[in-house]
Amino acid sequence: MDTAPLILFAQKVSDSNRLLFADLRRLQRILPDGITTRAEAEVLLSLDHLTRLDDAWGPYLAEAVARFARSGSEPPGLNPEIETWLTRILQATQPGTAASIVRAIGREGREMDERLTALVRRPARRAENTGQAASEMR
């Protein structure tokens, strides 16, 4: 897939520091089949730092990333390569986002490595650390 429309979308919402309902609908038109590559997942996860996010963003992001992770895996577990990548990338996201994604994967009864499930239990970052992490992701 050509990632240019997604990158332009991400830049626009990053510049405005918000992702509203209309933006989420536009994103769904850009990715009609959901996330199909790791790069797309990483772009979407990088938007989680925005100050103003529509209420539907969290559930959409969690299910989209979980669906992508499950798509490259055979039950009962996740593909080890996908699991390692997901563990690494989720460590840089908001704790609530990481937990939502891990729970979305687990809803289908998928077995997961302890490092990935531990992300559900990690403590929330303090506000100043969150801002620093967000600026590092840009």
Image (cartoon, rainbow, N blue to C red):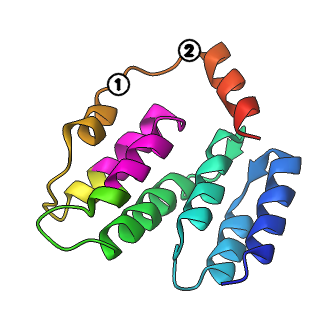
Under mark 2, the amino acid is Arg
Q: Position of residue 134 (x, y in %)?
A: 69, 33
Q: State the quadrant of the C terminus.
A: top right
Q: CA distance from mark 1 to mark 2?
A: 12 Å
Q: Is residue 46 left or right of residue 75?
A: right
Q: Answer whether residue 90 is magenta in the image.
A: yes
Q: Residues within 10 Å of mark 2 (few under 14, many from 20)?
A: few
Which type of secondary structure does the marked residue at label 1 adopt? loop
The quadrant holding residue 87 is: top left
Looking at the image, residue 45 sits to the left or right of residue 10; the answer is left
Relative to 58, does residue 131 appear above or below in the rendering?
Answer: above
The image quadrant of residue 51 is top right
Judging by the rendered image, the residue that carries numbered circle 2 is 126
Which label sits on residue 65? none
The x, y position of residue 118, in whole percent, is: 27, 32
Residue at x-position 62% and y-position 77%? 28
Q: Residue at x 67, y 49 (%)?
A: 47
Q: Nearer the viewer, residue 80 or 1?
A: 80
- Does 77 sit left or right of 33 as displayed? left
- Dominant SS in magenta: helix
The residues colored magenta run: 83-102
Residue 43 within the magenta-colored segment of the rendering: no
- The residue tagged 1 is 122
Q: Whole-percent x and y of residue 75?
A: 14, 71
Q: Using the image as rendered, state which of residue 83 and residue 6 is in the foreground.
A: 83
Q: Secondary structure at mark 2?
A: loop
Q: Residue at coordinates 53% horizontally, 64% vertically from top-left?
A: 38
Which quadrant holds the N terminus? bottom right
Label 1 crowd bin: few (<14), some (14–19), many (20+), radius 10 Å? few
In the figure, 77 relative to 115: above or below?
below
